[in-house]
Image (spheres, helix red, strand yellow):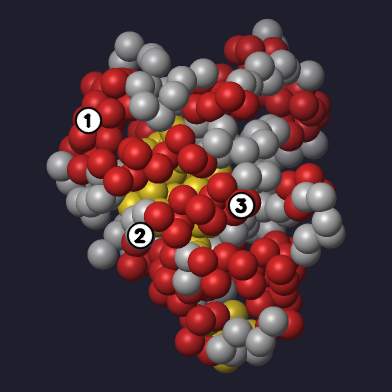
Amino acid sequence: MIDTPWGSLAVCDAHIHFFSHRFFASLAGQKGVPADQLAPLLNWQLPADDPGQLAGDWVREMDKHGIAKASLIASVPGDATSVIAAVERYPERFYGYMMVNPAAPEALAQSQAALASGHMHAFCFFPAMHHYSMHDDRVTALLDLLAAQPPAAAFVHCGALSLGVRKKLGLPSLFDMRYSNPIDLHEVALRFPQIRFVVPHFGAGYFREALMLCDLCPNVYLDTSSSNNWMRYEDTHLDLRAVFRRALDVAGPRRLLFGTDSSYFPRGWNSQIFEAQSKALYEIGVSDEIARLIFQDNLPHLFS
């Protein structure tokens, strides 16, 4: 529990990246160095081979800060087993998310196996990263899997996409923003009303479009995670208070999911994101009920 202006809340974080050993091994392979050489380059703590150990680190970190539950994202395609191991060990604390690349030949089989485990709750789509449209038939095949096993969610990254870890390692990020507009989800979300679609970072620069999508599709949610530096793209000054006001006005309080975008150790859980967002919500005068929905109740309800 965290003490807040609205009382003690069992805060749930809808956006934590599970940077597993396999995640770092993938980066090391792209860099052409042994995985253990990444630690001095990043100044980060690299996890052990056992994903259960990393899961335990996150549980202790969550306990330290008073976080009740969190969504863990497998942050490279093919790493679902790491998150599955974490959720299997701590099912009361974690929801499992896996990054999928629909263009990969093994994507459908891996996704079927992950859902069959009973420990995977959402697929994460990064269209700009992997260069595909959400209208691609291969995407539809994955969404059919989710639709057959409700309640399941589709996390779809839209807007600006910048990966700090790749910058630190000098790795190229050949993304294609033609596939980044939330409007591309409109017909897809309407076609799959039984799936909850989550757009992170308020659309990451496509805030207006994300709000339009939420207004037209009641099964679309926004996650509030990260520093939300996309606000500097706006023609006029926009701060978190204005973002929350507009999101609450259009999407309503039940479709906003608090998240931090935490990822690596030794930093651990990024409490500064919580502090900034709770301050913004307090300053616009949200009620105890609304704060409880955003910070505590909405993530569990997503999968109920």
* Number of callouts: 3
In the image, which disc is placed on residue 248?
none
Q: Position of residue 14 (x, y in %)?
A: 49, 57
Quadrant of residue 116 in the image? top left
Comparing labels 2 and 1, the label whose residue is closer to the camera? 2
Q: Position of residue 56 (x, y in %)?
A: 49, 53
The residue where tag 2 is placed is 218
Q: Residue furthest top?
A: 32
Taking the image as drawn, is residue 193 in sight?
yes
Residue 47 appears left or right of 267: left
Q: Depth check: 159 or 8 in front?
A: 159
Mark 2 and mark 1: span between their CA atoms?
27 Å
Q: Secondary structure at mark 1?
A: helix
First-in-chain label (2 vs 3):
3
- Tag 2: amino acid: Pro
Q: Is residue 106 above or below residue 122?
A: above
The residue where tag 1 is placed is 112
